[in-house]
Image: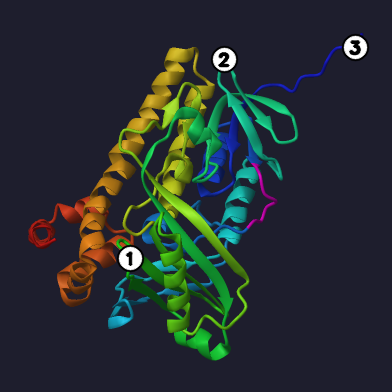
């Protein structure tokens, strides 16, 4: 009888070709690892996401990434349920770059492939077994073995369920991409809108992208009909309801429990799969890019580990890095979210009527500071204490 062929063990298998997965794969491939990316959809694929790159996300992109920036938002329009509107202008050169997520993710995946990673799209994950070398089963019935597995397969991650990721906040985001007239495109050019919504913790957004606007709303999961009603009102208010949308989708965003695992054995999770998302703004791209890079670095160490103890130490080091940085940012943002959910008018008034508050927000948007650093500012501490007494 002939010998049965078995594919060699991969150093690193990454599940998911979003910003986290593509970043992890690129870093591991650049370090000389044999890397495989599994992506369930065909690349490029649509992803429900505003597609706004704040300064922190821009800084985490690979140098010279060939992705088209569709617009740059310098003006920020804020209002509260369509009232008390105020427009503020950023002091930065490119505070928020507007991109389409399918183009961003495809560009990041191309860079990973250029570094040596193999990409298999149209291949869904069916199961994980981490007894010894990690084995993953695909929807096509294939079993693939790896020295380390990086789960970057989104907020509904199978890898996250496998290692026991828990979340304390889950929200429903509804979004459309709507073609707009030349007149409307000129009106929105360089201007983005944030509207604080009628549901606790909710808001809506309009992001300009040339002849298309990305618009949506987000609110806590569990109030689906109220969120859909808000979406209808929101689109009508900004004259975006009549055009046939190019995409009309929904998506759950999740924020991890502070004690939730980020690694187990030879498996690590990053990005949405790890529940890494800003609790207030629900911004996740910068979290995905940064955690993806660190997951790639951890994967290199785990793949080369002499034994389970060394592999476990690399995973623990990754978890500490994420907790000390992204975890701290989430904890600080949650303080703002707790106030915003109960008294959105206080947040709106502080942001639009107190110049020091706007300047601090502008510094964050431009990537010059973080939310924890802002909250250590004496004025921010006084404001939080005062707001806390009012809620």
Q: Is residue 154 above or below residue 35?
A: below
43 in magenta? yes
User: Which residue sits at x=60%, y=44%?
Assistant: 112
Left or right, 136 with respect to 97, comes to right
Question: Mark 2 to mark 1: distance in Å?
Answer: 48 Å
Residue 304 seen: yes
The label number, if any, that marks residue 210 in the structure image: none
The label number, if any, that marks residue 132 in the structure image: 2
Q: Earlier in the sequence, mark 3 or mark 1?
A: 3
Q: Which residues are magenta?
A: 39-45
Please, what secondary structure does the residue beneath circle 1 have? loop
Please, what secondary structure does the residue beneath circle 2 have? loop
Residue 94 seen: no
Left or right, 359 with respect to 183, comes to left
> Overall secondary structure of the magenta stretch?
loop
Question: Mark 3 to mark 1: distance in Å?
Answer: 65 Å
Question: Mark 3 to mark 2: distance in Å?
Answer: 27 Å
């Amino acid at each position: 009888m002939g010998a049965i062929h078995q594919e060699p063990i991969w150093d690193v298998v990454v599940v998911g070709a979003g910003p986290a997965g593509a970043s992890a794969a690129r870093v591991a491939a650049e370090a000389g690892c044999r890397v495989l990316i599994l992506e369930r959809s065909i690349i490029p694929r649509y992803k429900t996401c505003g597609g706004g790159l704040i300064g922190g996300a821009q800084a985490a992109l690979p140098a010279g990434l060939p992705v088209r920036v569709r617009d740059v938002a310098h003006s920020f329009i804020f209002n509260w349920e369509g009232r008390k509107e105020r427009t503020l202008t950023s002091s930065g050169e490119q505070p928020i770059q507007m991109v389409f997520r399918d183009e961003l993710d495809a560009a990041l995946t191309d860079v990973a492939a250029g570094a040596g990673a193999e990409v298999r799209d149209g291949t869904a994950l069916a199961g994980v077994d981490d007894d010894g070398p990690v084995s993953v089963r695909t929807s096509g019935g294939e079993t693939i073995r790896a020295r380390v597995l990086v789960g970057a397969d989104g907020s509904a991650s199978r890898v996250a369920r496998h290692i026991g990721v828990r979340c304390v906040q889950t929200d429903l985001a509804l979004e459309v991409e709507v073609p707009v007239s030349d007149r409307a495109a000129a009106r929105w050019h360089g201007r983005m809108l944030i509207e604080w919504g009628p549901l606790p913790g909710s808001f809506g957004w309009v992001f300009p992208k040339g002849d298309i606007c990305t618009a949506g709303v987000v609110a806590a999961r569990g109030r689906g009909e109220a969120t859909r009603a808000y979406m209808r009102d929101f689109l009508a208010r900004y004259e975006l309801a009549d055009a046939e949308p190019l995409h009309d989708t929904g998506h759950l965003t999740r924020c991890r429990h502070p004690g939730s695992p980020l690694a187990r054995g030879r498996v690590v999770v990053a990005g949405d799969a790890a529940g890494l998302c800003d609790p207030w703004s629900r911004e996740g791209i910068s979290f995905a890019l940064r955690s993806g890079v660190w997951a790639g670095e951890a994967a290199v160490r785990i793949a080369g580990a002499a034994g389970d103890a060394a592999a476990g130490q690399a995973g623990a080091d990754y978890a500490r890095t994420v907790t000390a940085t992204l975890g701290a940012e989430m904890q600080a943002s949650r303080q703002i979210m707790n106030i915003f959910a109960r008294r959105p008018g206080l947040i709106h008034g502080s942001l639009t009527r107190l110049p020091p508050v706007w300047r601090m927000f502008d510094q964050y948007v431009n990537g010059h500071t973080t939310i924890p650093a802002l909250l250590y500012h004496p004025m921010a501490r006084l404001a939080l204490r005062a707001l806390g007494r009012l809620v």
